[in-house]
Image (spheres, helix red, strand yellow):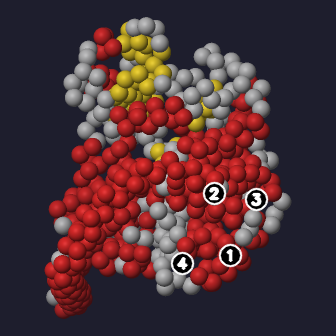
Amino acid sequence: MLITHRKRLLSLYRIAAKYRLDTHFADVPEFAPIARLLRVHPASFGRSHQPLGVKLALEEMGTLFLKLGQLLSTRSDLLPPQIIAQLSLLQDKVAPFDAKTAIATIEHAKYGLGQPIGDIFARFDEMPLAAASVAQVHTAALHDGREVVVKVVRPNIKQGIISDFELLRQMAAWASARLEAARAIHLIDVVEDYRQIMLNELDLTLEAANSTKMRHNFTDSRLIYVPEVYMSAKQVMVSERIFGVPISQTDLFDALGYDRAALAKKGLTIFFTQVFRDNFFHADMHPGNIFVETMPDGRAVAEPRYIGLDCAIMGELSKEDQLIVARMLLSVMNANYTALVDIIWQAGWIPPSADKYALMRDMSRTVSPMVLKPIHEIDFASVLFEILSIARRHRMSIPPQLMLLLKTLVHVEGLGRELYPELDIWSLAKPILTAWVKSQLDPIKNIQELQARLPEVLLSTTDLPKLLNQSLQSLATLGAHQDAILHEIQSLRADGLNERRHDWIALAGFILMLGMAWWSALAIHLYLAPIFFILAIGVILWRVLL
């Protein structure tokens, strides 16, 4: 129950009121009761709307909410554009923890490398190179002279993140039981998806495996270099130190004599190669994770490559989703919104009750003028966000992996245009996508794949008698299963009636306490009125936290 997290809830309540989050969701009817609660908290008194209130509140709420905000910045299908704009500004920079704690973690037998630090490194620099909410990075040198970076997970954060996620899950369940909008976006599933992403980010062995796989995919590549991982444990990862310029420092590229247009095209080529050749793409490509290669002393290299860092969040698609994405992108590039809606409809992302033709009209009316501009003036991110905004109004549900992909594409396109404003993503991507789609639909290739799988298919036929027997057993138990479902429906109905009864009790108590406050102010003494007013708020809080 939410009441078990009352201390944390009250802390979050204070922060939300302090930054007047009620003013950021004024247009959301479902948020109205919570908005009223925020307005009566003393922390909101005398404060007005803050343009960056959502960003500042999430940063103050702690690691989980900051990271969750960064992840939700990809979900334009769930949140309005003004909130997405704030989430994209979240900064993951915190004070470093002390070097003794980092060394103890590195030497830990279970979560670290299990050796004295002097046995592992010839030199270990106690001053961290960078510090974030999940981990910090130190520079060091191995005994053979190789320069490395050592990533160490921040101590004692896992339990807090798990506890906060339990609170979020209960809040999602509470909202889903009461709000149609929460059920429409599958809020509980969204929380569970992000819980797994966050917990994976705390396990550096997973990041090490991702880095190794991505490095293998781009062995000897002239496009991107992925540093080698030398050692890893749950909370420690030692990898090759690289030298480069952050992608955001475009002025340095001019000083180094780097060709911005070539770099921008390389970036897009890397993205499409990851998605369609490897089906393993970096899904956290913000400027802090993307560097361009230089010499260790900062001088230019002859053919600069990108450097891939922080492979904690990676995306993969099924073959079906790969084909859907390619066809969707081609439809947008060709301004063929009839085909786009047909693809979305066939993918099952739109509920049966949705008006397919109304969606098609909205797409054509809103997005067509945007793509009729000259090619170098088209803002692909704006086109995509507008499509997702329309889809959200029509209650379209997009799988999380596809949202990761679309977010990454927007980041890549934005970084590419920052490097080279005349970048033409359409002409670069269209031949790649067209060739890939044709290769997937090539009948000769499909026949060859079928021939390669023929022995496996033939062997699977031996399971037919077993499958037939299982089917008969399933039919025999179907009646019992239906009885169980009926019992569950009756239980849910009883729970719903119980929730409604609690709502009426809370409403009656609230009205009674307000009446007592008014009566005491008029008939007894003014000082009693605030007591009854506080009791009225207490009744509402009891219902919210129940």
> Mark 1 sits on what residue?
338
Q: Are marks 3 and 2 in contact (CB under 8 Å)?
A: no
Q: Quadrant of the C terminus?
A: bottom left
Identify residue type, mark 1. Thr
State the SS at label 3.
loop
Instruction: From the top left corner, tell me how far across and down residue 35 is, in percent.
Output: 39, 73
For this rendering, which residue is in front, 471 or 50? 471
Question: Residue 90's x, y, as percent?
Answer: 49, 49
Whole-number angstrom distance, CA of label 1 to CA of label 4: 16 Å
Q: Circle 1 sits in a helix, a strand or a loop, which is it?
A: helix
Q: Residue drawn at (43%, 40%), measured in percent from left and top?
A: 312
Mark nearer the viewer, 3 or 1: 1
Identified by mark 3, the residue type is: Ile
Q: Position of residue 100 (x, y in %)?
A: 28, 22
Q: Residues within 10 Å of mark 1 (few under 14, many from 20)?
A: some
The reply to whether dot 4 and dot 3 touch (C-beta < 8 Å) is no
Q: Nearer the viewer, mark 1 or mark 2?
A: 2
Disc 3: CA contacts within 10 A as few (<14), some (14-19) or many (>=20): some
Label 4 SS: loop
In-front residue for pair 228/90: 228
Mark pair 4, 3: CA separation: 25 Å
Identified at 51% across, 26% down, the residue is: 227
Q: Which residue is mark 3?
A: 378
Q: Nearer the viewer, residue 420 or 501?
A: 420
Q: Which residue is mark 4?
A: 394
Give the CA separation, mark 3 to mark 1.
Answer: 20 Å
Split into 4 quadrants, where in the image is the N terminus? Answer: bottom left
The disc, 1 or 4, on the residue closer to the chain's N-terminal end is 1
Q: Earlier in the sequence, mark 1 or mark 2?
A: 1
Q: Is residue 87 visible?
A: no
Q: Which residue is mark 2?
A: 443
